[in-house]
């Protein structure tokens, strides 16, 4: 019984057999998917939109305006989370049957924290990209300076070599 180490190539490899003779003979790649699609049984969309808390059925615990002070609101929610955790500990000791409401409150605070943090992701991505590009610019300037320094060194060595050869 013979077994293959690797599986056979997919059948569409035959579409590219004439590529070396005529590179224009290959088929065009499929166009990007736009809108919604199904993958592994889940519905997904290509639009990158952060759903509101109301759409998710979660009460919003911070102001719903465009000028949100993220630092202040995150600190406020963090304090509120700490308070709810302490209340949960108290409820578990005093009235264990009433813990479900406290768990729901903690869950709501966590979801609000995550929503605030997720709304900062585009800003974080933009700042990261700016930082990476600044590093690339700095590295390229350093490489150019290194090339200039080495060129001057080579020119000096050539000049010394010509002087040495002319002196013989």
Image (cartoon, rainbow, N blue to C red):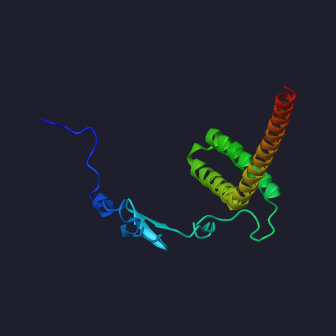
- Residue at image position (58%, 43%) is 96
Q: Is residue 9 above or below residue 33?
A: above
Q: Is residue 44 above or below residue 3?
A: below
Q: Residue furthest front?
A: 168
Q: In this view, does 147 lie above or below 16?
A: above
Quadrant in the picture for residue 19: bottom left
Question: Residue 122's x, y, as percent?
Answer: 69, 61
Q: In this orientation, which residue lies closer to the viewer: 50 or 32?
A: 32
- Residue at image position (43%, 69%) is 37
Q: Which residue lies furthest to the top in this view?
A: 168
**Quadrant (top left, top right, bottom left, bottom right) of the C terminus:** top right
**Quadrant (top left, top right, bottom left, bottom right) of the N terminus:** top left
- How many numbered marks are there? 0
Q: In this view, does 67 lie above or below 77?
A: below
Q: In this orientation, which residue lies closer to the viewer: 12 or 65?
A: 12
Q: Which residue lies furthest to the bottom in this view?
A: 35
């Amino acid at each position: 019984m013979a077994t293959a180490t690797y599986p056979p190539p997919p059948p569409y490899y035959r579409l590219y057999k004439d590529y070396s003779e005529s590179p224009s003979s290959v088929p065009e790649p499929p166009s990007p998917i736009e809108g919604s699609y199904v993958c592994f049984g889940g519905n997904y969309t290509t639009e990158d939109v952060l759903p509101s808390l109301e759409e998710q059925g979660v009460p919003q615990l911070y102001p719903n305006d465009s000028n949100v002070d993220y630092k202040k609101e995150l600190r406020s929610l963090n304090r509120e989370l700490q308070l709810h955790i302490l209340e949960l500990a108290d409820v578990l000791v005093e009235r264990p049957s009433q813990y479900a409401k406290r768990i729901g409150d903690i869950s709501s605070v966590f979801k609000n924290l995550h929503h605030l943090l997720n709304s900062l992701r585009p800003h974080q991505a933009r700042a990261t990209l700016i930082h990476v590009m600044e590093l690339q610019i700095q590295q390229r300037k350093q490489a150019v300076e290194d090339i200039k320094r080495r060129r001057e060194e080579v020119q000096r060595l050539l000049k010394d070599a010509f002087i040495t050869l002319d002196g013989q």
